[in-house]
Each structure stands twice: as C-alpha cells, then as structure tokens.
Amino acid sequence: MTDKNNCKHLDICGGCSLTQNYEEQLALKQEKVKTELADFWKKDIPITPSLNTIYHRNKVELSFCNQVLWKDGKPPKKEEPLEFEKTLGFRQKKRWDRCVNMEECFIFSPHLAKIKQAIYNWANKENISFYDSRKRVGTLRQLMLREGKNTDEMMLVIVSTQNIDVPDSLLKELSEIIPNINILCAINDAPSDATPIENVKVLQGKDNILEKLVLSDKEISFRISAKSFFQTNTKTAELLYDKTRKLVKKIKPKIVYDLYGGAGCFSFVVSDLCEKTFCIENVSSSIKDGEHNAKINNITNVKFLEASVEDYLKLNKIPPQDSLVIVDPPRAGIHPKSCKKIANSGVEKIIYVSCNPKTLADNLTDFTKNYKIETIEAFDFFPHTNHVETMVIMNKINNK
C-alpha cells in the first residue's frame, strides 16, 4: 500500500474513498458485509483480497469539468469575482460538480497520467469547451479507458456532447504513449453522465479490445466493446470464477441460467460443466459481444437471449430439475417480483453474486423463505473504495 498512499490527490480525489492501509480496508469491508447480512448469517465471512492493490482496474471513466476556481481549497466568497478552470480527472470527494485535475493515478495503468495530459493539452490548445455539470453545457464530457490486463490491449473513448474533430497529431501522440491503442469517440448529450453512450465511431484501430480470463483449468477469450460490462478487476475476478467452477463441478447441473449475464462471463466459465446455459441480458451490445465470444472460444452450448430478467421471467419458468441459477445483478439488486419468481422456482441451488450487500440483504429476505444459505464469501474487486463483491450459495429447503 505504500505506493498508493503516496498519491498526491489522495485526500481530495473521489477515485479512492478509502485511504487506510489495505489490511484495514479489508477488515472494514468484512464488517460491512457482516453487518448488512446479520439477519441471515451469524458466522464470520471470509474475504479474498485483490491480487493487486495498485494498477488493478481494467476500466476508468474520467470527467472533463469546467468549474469555479477554488483557491487554497476553498470556494470564493460571494463578493469575489468568479474565475473558472478546466480539469480532467475523477470527481472530487463528495462533489458531483467538481473534478481533480489529475497528475497521477495508481488504480488503472502507469500510462494513464500521460494519456490524460496529452488530451488535456490538446483540448486547451484547440479551446474546446469542457462540460459544466451545473449549467449542463460544454463539449468534452468524459474520457473512458479500458485495458486487457492479460493481453495489454487498450481502448480510449472520448465522449462529447456533439461531434468533434480529433486531429491525426493527437492520435499519433497517443500512439507513442501506447502503441496500437484503439481510439474511439462517442456522444452523450443527456443530462446524466450515466446515460449510455451513442454514435460510437472508430478513429484508430478497432472498436473493441481482447481480454482473457486465465483460470486454473480453463482459458477464455473475450471481446470487450465500449459499452460492454466486464468485471473491473480481472485478476480477482479470475479467483471468483475459479470458485464458481469448483462449485458447479460438485453440483453437476444440466442447465445453467445466467441472469444479468452481460457478455456471458459466467456462462462461458461453466459451459463445459453442463449441457446448456441460457444467458439473459438486456444490453444489445453485450449480447453481440457474447455471441462473438462464443465463436472465438468454440463454445456452442450457450444461448444468448436479449431481454431484461424481469421480462424473461414473466414469460418463462425456470425448470426446477437439474437446473442451476447464477444471478449477478447490478447494484440495485434483483427486482422484487423477479426475486420472488426465482425464489419460488424450486431449483436446488442458487449462486448469487452481488456488488451491493444492502440490496443483497433485501433479496435474501425472499430467498431465505425457501432456501438455506450454505456459504457466504466476499471478494475485494475494488481496493481503496467502499465497494465489495459478495458470493452467496443457497440450497433449496426440503419441506418433505
């Protein structure tokens, strides 16, 4: 943790919400999961640490900000004239409208600071406006970077509110920092930064990167596009997927239902351990990536279905015999109606992977009416943040 604690932006940058040493961070996360799930589990909950605590993330999203200049860390007084500054970096802690003009970062890649600075210098030289979150005006909005930790491939996406011209000179400069970097541009003109990007165009290279999951007894390749979901910490995700394979080998299901399946990570991880998997996902670009990934891995028994889990369960029942459900929902958890349907499905085992212990607890209220928790284990995918991944294994209660 010494390297991380030396970051000059540590006290103000929202990219890292936890600043304790790593052992203390793990203890805090264990206690967080234990507290949230106290109504369902009284035993200790082990936590698997991140294999790397610096340069561990495979994706970051930086924000362009046009903001009021603060002097000595303090906002100007009412009677003082307003000055503005352009920044590019993570949001400041506890601020939605201000960013840190980042000079270094230890969570993504050693190249991040140079890439950021090259784009920042170009934008200033060309006098391109940075987005003002308060006024909702400005051209440049976000900078997304994705990296294949096992392949060294990298993608950069410049997100703006309108079409922009990116000169060849900038593309060349970025390529000198990272040879063969894939550079794209995209549009987000909606009020929220969280709105999915549109009109993705390739400026250089291709519209995706290749990443690999290297498991103890299997290797899987993944094409990842700008909008695809992929676990943010590749190396620690491999540990979770290895754990999943060990569980599925013991369960021996014929059919696996991979709900909120993204580009099919869980489906591919267990595809050779069952007859068929159904990957349910509502993001079309993830479905396309998943179907492509099935081809490049010569996997023929994964069927992708483009639908929300809610819509799928309205029209389909999960057969209880010889089926396994793996569910990995977003932070909001499983919709209550869908949760009840899964909990009443009668399948023998459910593997629930959660990125939010609070909504996990909400869903366990329904699940534990028909299922008994076998094990709970936490995984730290997100060092230096409050986030923690949790895996819960549940067995159907036999009422006979």
Image: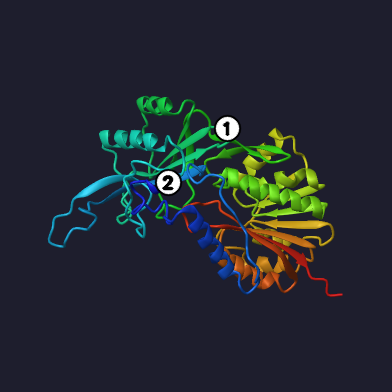
Picture quadrant of residue 203: top left
Q: Amino acid at mark 2?
A: Thr
Q: Answer with left or right where residue 4 lies relative to residue 52.
A: left
Coloration of the structure image: rainbow
Q: Where's residue 144, x and y in %?
A: 45, 42
Which residue appears farthest toward the left when viewing the image? 79
At label 2, counting other C-alpha atoms closer than 10 Å, the crowd grade (few under 14, some 14-19, many 20 or more) is few
- Which residue bears the numbered disc 2? 2
Camera-nearest residue between 21 and 299 = 21
Q: Amino acid at mark 1?
A: Thr
Q: Secondary structure at mark 1?
A: loop
Q: Where's residue 179, x and y in %?
A: 47, 25
**Residue lying at 71% horizontally and 41% vertically, measured from the top left:** 216
Residue 285 appears in view = no
Picture quadrant of residue 172: top left
Q: Quadrant of the C terminus?
A: bottom right
**Residue lying at 32% horizontally and 37% vertically, measured from the top left:** 120
Q: How many marks?
A: 2
Q: Answer with left or right where residue 397 lies relative to residue 90.
A: right
Single out the mark in the foreground, 1 or 2. Answer: 2
- Which residue bears the numbered disc 1? 151
Camera-nearest residue between 38 and 120 = 38
